[in-house]
Amino acid sequence: MKKYVCEPCGYIYDPAEGDPDSGIAAGTAFEDIPDDWVCPICGVGKEDFVLLEE
Amino acid sequence: MKATHIKEGIYWVGAIDLSVRNFHGYLTQRGTTYNAYLIIDEKITLVDSVKDTHTDEMMSRISSILDPAKIDVIICNHVEPDHSGAISAIVEKNPNVTIVTCASGKKGLEQHYYGNWNYHIIKTGDTYSIGKRSFEFLLTPMVHWPDNMICYMPEEKILFSNDSFGQHYATSGRFDDEVSHDEALYEAKKYFANIVLPYSAQVIKELEAASKFEIELICTSHGVIWKKYIAEIIQEYNKWARNVTKKKVVIAYDTMWKSTEKMAYAIYEAFEQEGYEIALRNLQVNHESDVMTDVIDAEYICVGSPTLNSEMMTNVVGFLTYMRGLAPKGGRKAVAFGSYGWNGKSIPGVEQFLKDCNYDVKAVFTHQYRPTKEDLQQITTKTLEIIKQNN
């Protein structure tokens, strides 16, 4: 599954880890995260994330 | 005004703001400084600048060494206007000056000053030579804006840490061994609690990355330069960033007719019996930024509000909103309490805020009108049980 990076702060959403503190289980694809989820570091919404090119 | 000699060819040329008391909501009882550093090398370099209101002071200090138009390079570690506010003034003197910053620093500067400036963009690990000396950069996004970065000068063993390790502390002393040690440490703690705290995870990464540097001076962007107490301030940062708490409770409340205050003291009684350090803070007379400084190493957070017109009192809402934004983590325990007249809606409101902070709410104490001695004793007894259960 693909990783996404938060443009303002650089946080990387890694589906393998999820975001358990915000209730996003490990293994959740970025596309399947609810729309009201926000970056756990800087608080912006999903729309400010871009696909991480590796 | 004159520059302060830091090391051979390196000067402090910042500004001392003795009168500022409100820094975007943070009560700065001791004022602050905006630190800028001038380095005389093949390329004359300025590391950060000052708030625009203090441009003349910075220019005067630079002019005591050389003409500010001779500055070739400005390192911008952070876009916030208290550090970037005087860059325009240098650009006016020398339109060819090179602004060295990261990509989000450039973006932020363009969104603040709209200038068509000459940029040199760096990323983590890049180095930039100014002659005999050089900078190595480490991007530290969100400590505490997206553009934050720090830079290390290996030839001089100086870490230019920008906001990290800073203090809102205006003194005539520029170094940590020239001022009250307790005051400097307290102001560093207050700064961490009110500015840096939400980004603790990034601070830990920053500390790990910076640990490979041999550091003789930490040149911050606010307050004193760390020289004698570098190991101590790094150790404290490690504790604060890792949410290390101690046997301490914060009891913060507002009160209308003293009933909620009596409940606060009933909780106090239990923690006193158990030998806790206690910070009991009436929010009518204690500023939220001071209470946050108390919160940072506290194991228990107890918050009380009476019900006023079906709501929490605004001092309490303000404090809770501020604390929720700063998001101190680390499995802290909490208590919500308050008295009321006919509907007790404030107390679930406090409880919800505490849950939003991810605190483990151990008890909710609610009382209609005035609690009797027996009612208060029950609160003390129940609080004692909670403390003992969670030891």
Image: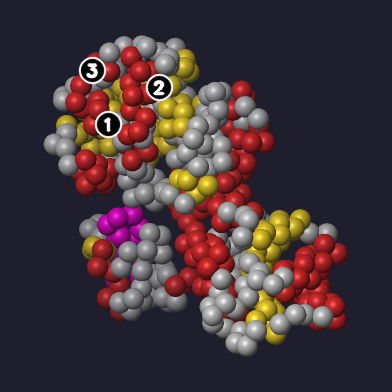
Range covered by the magenta-colored residues:
A1-15
Query: Which chain contains the residue that carries disc 3?
Result: B
Amino acid on which disc 2 is placed: Val
**Residue identifier under label 3:** B69
Q: Residues within 10 Å of mark 1 (few under 14, many from 20)?
A: many
Label 3 close to label 1 by CB (< 8 Å): no
**Residue identifier under label 1:** B87
Amino acid on which disc 3 is placed: Ala
Q: Please tell me which of labels 2 and 1 falls first in the chain.
A: 2
Residue appearing at x 58%, y 32% in the figure: B230
> Which secondary structure lies at badge 1?
helix
Q: How many marks?
A: 3
Q: Is the residue B216 above or below the residue B374 in the image?
A: above
Q: Quadrant of the C terminus of chain B?
A: bottom right
Q: Is residue B114 left or right of residue B183?
A: left
What kind of secondary structure does the magenta stretch mostly adopt? loop
Q: Is the residue B107 above or below the residue B181 in the image?
A: below
Query: Disc 3 and disc 2: Cα gap in Å?
Result: 15 Å
**Residue identifier under label 2:** B13
Residue appearing at x 17%, y 42% in the figure: B114
Q: Is residue B317 magenta?
A: no
> Which secondary structure lies at badge 2?
loop
Q: Residue furthest left?
A: B116
Callouts 2 and 1 in the same chain: yes
Residue nearest the observer in this picture, B148 or B168: B168
